[in-house]
Structures are given as structure tokens and as C-alpha cells.
Amino acid sequence: MRNSLFTVFMASALLVACNKTKPVVAEPVAPASLATPDFHTGVVTTAQAKGGCPFLVIMDSGEGNKALIPIGLDEKYLKDGLKLSFKFRPSRASSGGCLTGRPAILEEVSVVK
């Protein structure tokens, strides 16, 4: 009798605790000056091919002149001088013999006219 009473009490306490609503907390929005854009632009280059970098994407000067080694980028985008818009994330892939850029996976790639 005690075990069943205890079980009923614990089950009802659990149900009551699970039905409580939690207050909604709004996430703070970063000021426009601190917000970073999702998309970046850059130009594909083969200028460092002799240095072990067959293709690099040189990001525009307003974005820190970063050189990215595109990992797994579709061949239709691997053309010297092609300007791209993209999102990227760092990759742990080996950069091979390329010491100029850092490996990155480019996503949502499109050509900029």
C-alpha cells in the first residue's frame, strides 16, 4: 500500500512539474556595428599554383584579405578570376603544400556579376 501511494504521489508530482510553463527570454540582438555578415565575396585565383596552391579564394579587402583554400568546391567555380559570393566555415583538411591560405568549406556559393 505504501509503495503504490508513493508511486502515485511521485507520478503526480512529475506531471505537475512538467506542465509548468517557462518564461520566454528574448535573446539580445547585436548592434549593427558588431554584427558580421553571413555572406562573403572573393575572387578565385591560380596565381599561387607554383607555390602548391592550385586554387585560392582571395576574400575582398574589406574582409581582411584572407586567402581560403576551397575544400570540395564544385569544379564549375574553379575558374581563375571568377568572383564568388559564399558562406564559409574552417576545415581541418590538410592544406597540402599550400602555405598561403587556410582550408575552408565554401557553402551557398554563387557567382557575382
Image: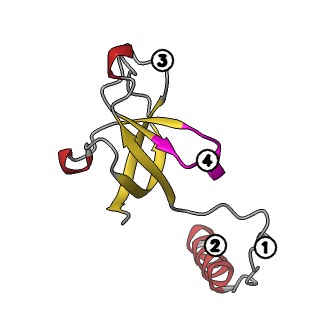
Point out residue 41 in the picture as x, y percentages from the top left corner. 48, 55
Label 1 sits on residue: 28
- Characterize the local packing of mark 2: few (<14), some (14-19) or many (20 or more) Cα atoms within 10 angstroms: few
Labelled pair 1, 3 in contact (Cβ < 8 Å)? no
Residue drawn at (33%, 36%), measured in percent from left and top? 71
Q: CA distance from mark 1 to mark 3?
A: 39 Å
Residue 46, image quadrant: top left
Q: Nearer the viewer, mark 2 or mark 3?
A: 3
What number is the disc on residue 99? 3
- Expressed as whole percent of the image width and height from the top left, the position of residue 4 reads 56, 73
Residue 95 percent coordinates (x, y): 40, 21
- Residue 53 among magenta residues: no
Quadrant location, the C terminus = bottom left
Q: Vertically, is 23 above or below 6? A: below
Q: Quadrant of the N terminus?
A: bottom right
Numbered badge on residue 10:
2
What amino acid is at disc 1? Pro
Q: Point out the stretch of residues depicted in magenta.
A: 58-66
Q: Which residue is mark 4?
A: 61
> Is the residue marked by circle 1 packed among few (<14), some (14-19), or many (20+) residues within 10 Å?
few
Mark 4 element type: helix
Q: How many marks?
A: 4
